[in-house]
Image (cartoon, rainbow, N blue to C red):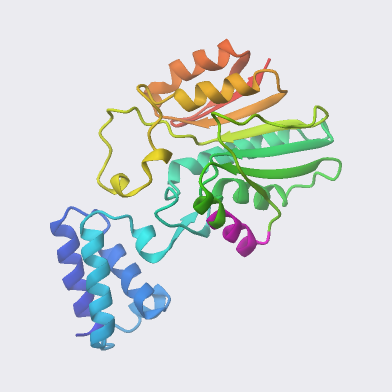
Amino acid sequence: MTINECLKQQKVLLESHNIPTAYLDSELIISYVLNKERSWILARPEYRLNSKDLSNIQTLCNRRASHEPIAYLIGKQEFYGRDFIVSPDTLTPRPETETMVELLLSQVENLRSKVESVNIIDVGTGSGCIVITAALEISNFELRNTRFEYFGLDISTPALKIACENAKRHKVDIKFKKFDLIKNTFDLQESSFNIFLANLPYVPKNFNINLAATHEPNFAIFGGDDGLDYYRLLFDKIHKINSLVITESLPFQHTELSKIARKNEFKLINSSDFIQVFSSK
């Protein structure tokens, strides 16, 4: 069977299981199995696949047909223009989360020359894609008088291992630490300004999630009855810390999340569809 024939066959399979990106996912799986770039695949439609490669392609496409995330099948996901290692121990990075980085960068611009030391703290870091991207993007700024330190916190040891590997691959210095938001407290120097990046579990307990999300770790998805339990914990623990907090949640949760923030003396200063930015008063 040629690459072109295989692409068509797997596209039909995935479309029959309501995979919206059937052709792209077929390309990615074939590229992964052959260990070639997509451009190589597309330039050789008549290349004949051997039986072992065909078997591996079919196995992965069958898993994709069951709505297992493509990122788990090929072991990586793009975020903010860079590839990050992922596994079933981490959530797959989502496009809407890139807005968190964009709003962070706008806040960093506002801090120019105003503070000497800034801690960027990614709570629930998972694959580390947010804090690693933050470090890479901020390194492009001309902020000679401000020192940045980066921290990635997570309760999951397997997730932290993946985050460390991603930081190593992207050559950034991030301090990763196992952290339980229920049991642990933040140990931060009073002289530093702190920016918390919080993409915490926020899906309500009885919320209907899509099939792909059922393959992701439940503890990283659900946040109690209304989805905001972990944000209540976070704001309660940091209400006396001079800081900004950038959160991700569902749009219908924004009003309640703003109330939680106000109760802990934070005010809303910016927002988008999924992201809110709060500042300590």
Q: Position of residue 250 (x, y in %)?
A: 39, 29
Q: Is residue 137 above or below residue 224?
A: below
- Write the residue at 24% across / 62% down: 63
Residue 252 on the magenta segment? no
Secondary structure predominantly adopted by residues drawn in magenta: helix
Quarter where residue 19 is shown: bottom left
Q: Looking at the picture, tell me which residue is in the foreground, 134 or 198.
A: 198
> Is residue 269 visible to the viewer in this orientation of the structure?
no
Classify the position of the N terminus by image quarter. Answer: bottom left
Is residue 14 left or right of 150 when viewed as pictured?
A: left
Q: Residue at x 16, y 72 (%)?
A: 9
In-image side of 254 versus 50 (left or right): right
Query: Does 36 sit left or right of 65 as displayed?
Result: right
Q: Is residue 164 magenta?
A: yes
| Quarter of the figure with residue 203 | top left
Is residue 134 in sight in this rendering?
A: yes
Q: Magenta stretch? A: 162-171
Q: Seen in the image, is 271 located left or right of residue 22?
A: right
